[in-house]
Image: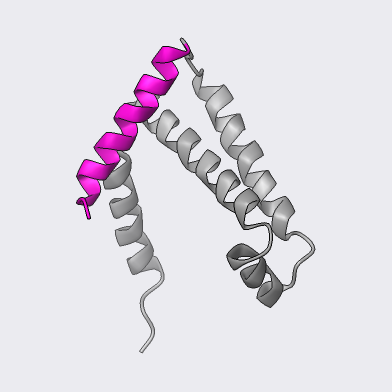
Amino acid sequence: MKDRETTMEALKETLREFNEARNWKHPVLNTAISISLEASELLEIFQWCDKKEAERVARETDREHFVEELADVLIYCMDLAISCDVDIVSAIEEKLRKNAKKYPAKG
């Protein structure tokens, strides 16, 4: 298994190549809107589910749709990070550190 940084760099390069091959330049606002729209699609999958059913649906039913929408959210997030020159891995690590302080582990 590749280490996370190598994998992230490979994904970023693949995304850059994909966008360049199509001459796609996503304005920051459009990318942010796309993230919101794709996240809404995820919510739509689970909106009528209770907690246990939502967990089951995420694992079984509509799995392909769920995974596709999740991947879209991540692609747009990566695209936004690239266009704004943000090291997304470091940003996530920092946010997790902040969350660990804000929400300490129990026990």
Determine the image quadrant of residue 62: bottom right
Is residue 74 rendered to the left or right of residue 59? left
Image coordinates of residue 97 in percent, x first then y, are 30, 60
As for residue 79 lying within the magenta part, the answer is no
Is residue 94 rendered to the left or right of residue 102? left
Determine the image quadrant of residue 30: top right
Give me the residue at 33% from left, 67% from top: 101
Quadrant in the picture for the N terminus: bottom left
Give the mark count.
0
Q: Compared with residue 88, is residue 64 higher up or lower down, i.e. above or below? A: below
Determine the image quadrant of residue 11: top left
Colour mode of the rendering: one colour
- The residue furthest right is 48
- The residue furthest bottom is 107
Image coordinates of residue 72 in percent, x first then y, are 54, 39
Give me the residue at 66% from left, 37% from top: 37
Image coordinates of residue 14 in percent, x first then y, are 34, 29
Q: Compared with residue 93, is residue 106 higher up or lower down, i.e. above or below? A: below
Is residue 76 rendered to the left or right of residue 47? left
Q: Compared with residue 36, is residue 29 higher up or lower down, i.e. above or below? A: above
Q: Compared with residue 94, is residue 79 higher up or lower down, i.e. above or below? A: above
Q: Which residues are magenta?
A: 1-22
Image coordinates of residue 24 in percent, x first then y, are 48, 14
Quadrant in the picture for the C terminus: bottom left
Q: 77 or 104, which lies in front? A: 77
Q: 106 or 74, which lies in front? A: 74
- The residue furthest top is 23
Name the chief secondary structure element in magenta: helix
Q: 99 or 42, which lies in front? A: 42
Is residue 76 rendered to the left or right of residue 82? right
As for residue 20 lying within the magenta part, the answer is yes
